[in-house]
Amino acid sequence: MKFIIFTTAVLVSSILYASDIKNGQELFNEAACMECHNKEDFKYNEKKVKDMKKLYNSVEACAINNDAGWFDDETLDVVHYLNKEYYKLKDAKK
């Protein structure tokens, strides 16, 4: 149980503090995310994405389902790119 709590804390702190937005944009474009999504999909919707953890989970699920092969830091880069461009969640560090 302590391991799960620790892992969650590390993930959340990573989400809040690490990002390379330019790399996130490149990864997002290379993965051809817009083949499945359109800009309307990325508009803020509290029922879908209300915090950075949920956004991370959503991006990670897409990456896994589409065999993007991203490492955790690359997923974070895409999360921060999407947040900067679309979601504008307030709990994110730049």
Image (spheres, grey):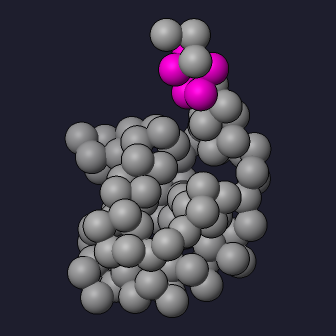
The overriding secondary structure of the stretch rendered in magenta is helix
Q: Is residue 7 magenta?
A: yes
Residue at left offset 67%, top offset 31%:
10
Q: Is residue 2 above or below residue 55?
A: above
Q: Is residue 83 magenta?
A: no
Looking at the picture, how far across and down is residue 79, in whole percent?
54, 59
**Can residue 16 be seen by looking at this rendering?**
no
The reply, left or right, for residue 47 in relation to residue 26 is left
**Can residue 75 be seen by looking at this rendering?**
yes
Q: How many marks?
A: 0
Q: Is residue 68 above or below residue 5?
A: below
Looking at the picture, how far across and down is residue 21, in whole percent?
69, 69
Q: Is residue 25 above or below residue 74?
A: below
Q: Is residue 14 above or below residue 75?
A: above
Looking at the picture, how far across and down is residue 71, in whole percent?
60, 63
Quarter residue 88 falls in: bottom right
Residue at left offset 28%, top offset 88%:
35
The reply, left or right, for residue 39 in relation to residue 72 is left
Looking at the picture, how far across and down is residue 41, in whole percent?
28, 68
Quarter residue 19 falls in: bottom right
Residue at left offset 63%, top offset 20%:
6
Residue at left offset 40%, top offset 42%:
54
Q: Which residues are magenta?
A: 4-8
